[in-house]
C-alpha cells in the first residue's frame, strides 16, 4: 500500500486495506466474464460500441491508480471516476441489449465505482 495513502484521513466506512485486492480481483474476474460474453456475440455495430465503451472505461479504471496513488490528486482521480461512471453506464446499456448476463455481471463493479467516488470525495474533503 502506498505510504501517502496510509497517512490520509479517511471517511467513515473506509474498508481495511485487505478489502481492495480481494474486491478488485473479484470485480476484474466478473468484468472478464462479462466482456467474453459480449465478444462471443456476432459482429455488429452494437457489439463494436459495447467493446469500445468497455475498453474506454477500463482505460480510465487503470488511470485512476496513477492519478490517485502516484500524483496524489484526489481532484483528477474524482474526474477519472466520473469518466468511468459515464463509460461504464454506456457499456452496461449496450451490454443489456447484447447479453443480459454480461450486464448483470457489471452491477458489482458499478456499485464499487459509486463507493470509490464516496471514498475519494471523503478523502478530498478530510485532507
Image (cartoon, helix red, strand yellow):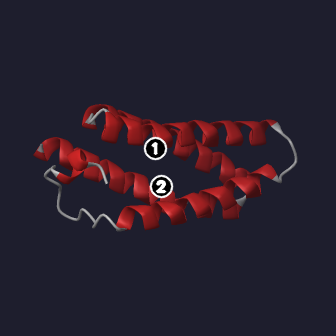
Quadrant of the drawing holding the C terminus: top left
Q: Residue 94, position in %: x, y?
A: 67, 46
Q: Nearer the viewer, residue 8 or 125?
A: 8
Q: Image check: 27 left or right of 33?
A: left
Numbered circle sitting on residue 65: none
Query: What residue do we see at 41% from left, 52% from top?
Result: 113
The residue furthest right is 42
Q: Image check: 101 left or right of 19?
A: right
> In this picture, is 95 found above or below 65?
below
Secondary structure type for disc 2: helix
Quadrant of the drawing holding the N terminus: bottom left
Q: Image check: 55 left or right of 4?
A: right
Q: Residue 108, position in %: x, y?
A: 49, 63
Q: Earlier in the sequence, mark 1 or mark 2?
A: 1
The residue indicated by pointer 2 is 110
Tell me which corner region of the image, top left, top right, bottom left or bottom right, holds residue 33. Answer: bottom right
Tell me which corner region of the image, top left, top right, bottom left or bottom right, holds residue 54. Answer: top right
Q: Residue 12, position in %: x, y?
A: 17, 62
Q: Nearer the viewer, residue 90 or 76?
A: 76
> In this picture, is 64 found above or below 76?
below
Query: What residue do we see at 61% from left, 45% from top?
Result: 91
Secondary structure type for disc 1: helix
The residue indicated by pointer 1 is 85
Query: What residue do we see at 27% from left, 52% from top?
Result: 119
Query: What residue do we see at 26% from left, 36% from top?
Result: 72
Mark 1–mark 2 Cα distance, whole angstroms, equals 7 Å
Answer yes or no: do the residues labelled 1 and 2 have beta carbons within 8 Å? yes
Mark 2 closeness class: few <14, some 14–19, many ≥20 residues within 10 Å: some
Tell me which corner region of the image, top left, top right, bottom left or bottom right, holds residue 50. Answer: top right
Q: Residue 92, position in %: x, y?
A: 60, 50
Q: Image check: 54 left or right of 5?
A: right
Amino acid at each position: 500500500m502506498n505510504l501517502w495513502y496510509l497517512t490520509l484521513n479517511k471517511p467513515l466506512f473506509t474498508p481495511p486495506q485487505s478489502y481492495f485486492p480481494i474486491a478488485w480481483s473479484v470485480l476484474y474476474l466478473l468484468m472478464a466474464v462479462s466482456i467474453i460474453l459480449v465478444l462471443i456475440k456476432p459482429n455488429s455495430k452494437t457489439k463494436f460500441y459495447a467493446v469500445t465503451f468497455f475498453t474506454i472505461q477500463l482505460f480510465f479504471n487503470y488511470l485512476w491508480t496513477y492519478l490517485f496513488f502516484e500524483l496524489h490528486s484526489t481532484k483528477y482521480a474524482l474526474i477519472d471516476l466520473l469518466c468511468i461512471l459515464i463509460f461504464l453506464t454506456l457499456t452496461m446499456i449496450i451490454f443489456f441489449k447484447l447479453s443480459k448476463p454480461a450486464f448483470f455481471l457489471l452491477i458489482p463493479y458499478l456499485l464499487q465505482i459509486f463507493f470509490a467516488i464516496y471514498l475519494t470525495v471523503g478523502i478530498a474533503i478530510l485532507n
